Image: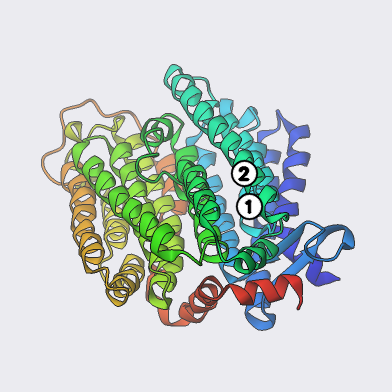
Amino acid sequence: MNMINLLLFPIIIPFFFAMILLFFKEQVVIQRVLTLIGLALSLIASLWLVATVKADGIQTVTLGSWPAPFGITMVSDMLSALLVTTTILITFFVVLYSFQSIGIERERFFYYPAILFMITGINGAFTTGDIFNMFVFFEVLLIASYLLIVLGGEKRQLRESIKYILVNVISSALFVITVGYLYSIIGTLNMADISVKIAEINQPGIISVIAILFLIVFGIKGAIFPLYFWLPGSYAAPPIPVLALFGALLTKVGIYAITRTYTLFFVHDIGFTHEFLMILALLTIVAGCIGALAYFDLKQIIIYNIIIAVGVILFGVAQMNQPGLEGAVYYLLHDMLIKGALFVLIGIIIYVTGTSNLRKMGGLIKTYPALGWTYLVAAFGLAGIPPLSGFIGKLLIVQGGFEAENVFGSIVILASSLVVLLSVIRIFIYAFWGSPSQVTLPVIHQSKYRQMMVPAVLLVVVTVAYGVGTEWLMPYMSDAADVLRDPSIYINAVLKE
């Protein structure tokens, strides 16, 4: 019985705490404390879940004790357990960071409940074993994100949020339609069962068409080329803590959904579906690189780096071999952590300088050495300088590309590393080197600056540990990749054959 609960804890605990917080709208301190307690409990549950999955294999629970394909199944394999843990960890640090940076007005307006409801949706989407249920959890996280993106009601936020909501409403409608098509052909919504049924009919052309429809639906959420057009504007509008959560977590749900469907369902016509995925992934990398070099705005540079990473991860998935998939899993988690850390850091830079325009900054290293060196470590981690975490994942993905004889794609990824390095080092050179800028610096409170630095430094430490502890973490990545490479492991765990 306790196993059953364990799997649902990372979804139920944030949901439960979010409901309680609704009653404490005005008591900001109570909200802060309860949010941290809720996240800490969720983190303990998710770490325990990872250990359980490592020891006993994939955990499943079918709600309402119906047998597997009929009831709604929740499935926690290594990939989803790791993603859930990373999600809660990042949220914990971002919430700590919010205490100083989001502002009391926003905190009073259901900021923390919205975050916890969003986590409920994200963790649910990572854990569900039912394709329609995935849509439901997508809606939960999207509704919470709609609140977060308009919170504070600045003109720019409201303008961008209209675009964000419209794009997501359209993609949600398309999601339901696509699930409907799939159901009309296969006759089941259980993901393991879908995989079995598609294998039985050997993926006719109509299923490949549905595969591309799913790629469009999840590609809008995950911001792949050419569907990323909404992302740079929408993500730059809300305050930094919200941007950090969106940048670290939301696109990753789309990537996870593509990864799951393309390794579980659509594996019989790889020459078509995965080739298409790979081409889009490479175009995504190129588009992201152009954006990262074109802008002189701190937020935009890091936001375009999200898009580059999406391409890199999906290129690894498209190889469908062990190193490619292992690298994709590793790099996916690395990117969540490092993007969270970088957004929090550029938030501090913007707070200190009062601008996000690189041309108006300079000489910060003299006044804020800790900020400068912490940022540099995070930047190197993003660019994949060994032994930091970006290196291993990219290395495995490139190896997977060479093994699958996609030499050109692997070279594009290696070249993109240089662009990433250039884009983040440019921030360092403009903001920290040179003579201090003549802009009148805002009056900043040292205590506030220090309190913002704590979660930022801790997050960077986590990313460094993630890179340095690779050897120790690799068995977990391999477990996650095994399930992706061999769908039967997942199917047998769910259908208990």
The Cα–Cα distance between marks 2 and 1, rounded to whole angstroms, is 6 Å
Of all residues, the one furthest to the top in this rendering is 155
Name the residue rendered at 46%, 62% in the picture: 333
User: Identity of the amino acid at label 1?
Assistant: Ala
Please tell me which residue lies in front, 350 or 387: 387
Is 165 displayed left or right of 8 in the figure? Answer: left
**Quadrant of the drawing holding the N terminus:** bottom right
Regarding residue 426, the answer to whether it shows in the image is: yes
Name the residue rendered at 75%, 71% in the picture: 495
Q: Position of residue 128 (x, y in %)?
A: 68, 57
Q: Position of residue 339 (x, y in %)?
A: 40, 52
Name the residue rendered at 48%, 77% in the picture: 473
Q: Are marks 2 and 1 in contact (CB under 8 Å)?
A: yes
Please tell me which residue lies in front, 196 or 170: 196
Regarding residue 460, the answer to whether it shows in the image is: no
Is 418 displayed left or right of 307 in the figure? Answer: left
Query: Which residue, given by chain and number where applicable, does mark 1 sit on?
Result: 125
Is 133 displayed left or right of 439 in the figure? Answer: right
Q: Secondary structure at mark 2?
A: helix
Q: Position of residue 143 (x, y in %)?
A: 63, 34
User: Identity of the amino acid at label 2?
Assistant: Phe
Q: Residue 232 sits in which quadrant?
A: top left
Please tell me which residue lies in front, 180 or 285: 180
Query: Which residue, given by chain and number where applicable, does mark 2 sit on?
Result: 138
Q: Secondary structure at mark 1?
A: helix
Name the residue rendered at 48%, 40% in the picture: 241
Q: Earlier in the sequence, mark 2 or mark 1?
A: 1
Q: Compared to 295, does 386 lie above or below?
A: below
